[in-house]
Image (cartoon, helix red, strand yellow):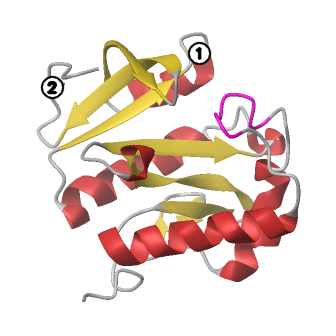
């Protein structure tokens, strides 16, 4: 099996680094994952403790090893701090669709970090993994998240039901054209 933790990492943007999770990242990412406000649109909600964050980090490490992509910690270059996570996951951990996802600490909101990190994750998905299409979903009223999707060339294709919730769905393909909505 290929080592999916080497070669293309870290992903680097002007202000950010993205790389596969390590167990030691649990404390840093807990600032985001443990915050009920930052996690209000995430179905699982905020995590109760660093132990739970460590377990989730372990799941992302397993996803990375198995598929060559996952959610990754987003590190602000200027401070060296983990300010959130961003990356690609099999939808509901089973696929076949691949979803762009991102979550950031409240202190990093409004600075364009989500758009910057999302662009790096999409490029990785198309250029390194070789995906044909990537989706993203969010609550219909989550304007900031929808703006991140649109800034990265994703096109609204309708509503969809995921995790028992009615969400809006966006798609981008490797050739930059949206796919018709299928089976949602």
Label 1 secondary element: helix
Q: Residue at x 18, y 25 (%)?
A: 178
Q: Residue at x 69, y 38 (%)?
A: 111
At which x and y percent is residue 127?
Answer: 21, 60
At which x and y percent is residue 170?
Answer: 34, 24
Q: Is residue 19 visible?
A: no
Q: Which quadrant holds the N terminus?
A: bottom left
Q: Report the residue marked by disc 1.
A: 143
The image quarter containing residue 112 is top right
Q: Report the residue marked by disc 2.
A: 179
Q: Residue at x 32, y 60 (%)?
A: 124
Left or right of residue 100, residue 15 in this image:
right
User: Along the line of sight, which residue is nearer the eye, 119 or 179?
Assistant: 179
The image quarter containing residue 177 is top left
Q: Residue at x 84, y 36 (%)?
A: 36
User: Among all residues in the image, which is located at the extreme left?
Assistant: 175
Question: Chief secondary structure of the magenta span?
Answer: loop
- Segment tinted magenta in the rendering: 38-44
Left or right of residue 110, residue 48 in this image:
right
């Amino acid at each position: 099996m290929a080592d999916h933790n080497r070669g293309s990492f870290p992903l680097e943007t002007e202000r950010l680094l993205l790389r596969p999770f390590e167990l030691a990242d649990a404390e840093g990412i807990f600032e985001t994952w443990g915050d009920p406000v930052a996690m209000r649109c995430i179905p699982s909600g905020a995590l109760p403790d660093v132990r739970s964050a460590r377990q989730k980090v372990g799941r992302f490490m397993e996803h990375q090893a198995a598929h060559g992509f996952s959610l990754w910690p987003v590190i602000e270059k200027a401070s060296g701090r983990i300010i959130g996570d961003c990356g690609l996951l099999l939808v509901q951990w089973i696929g076949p669709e691949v979803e762009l996802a991102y979550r950031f600490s409240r202190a990093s909101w409004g600075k364009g970090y989500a758009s910057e990190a999302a662009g790096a994750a999409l490029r990785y998905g198309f250029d390194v993994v070789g995906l044909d299409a990537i989706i993203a979903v969010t609550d219909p009223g989550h304007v900031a998240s929808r703006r991140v999707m649109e800034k990265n060339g994703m096109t609204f294709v309708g509503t969809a039901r995921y995790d028992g919730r009615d969400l809006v769905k966006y798609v981008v393909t490797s050739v930059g054209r949206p796919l018709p909505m299928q089976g949602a």
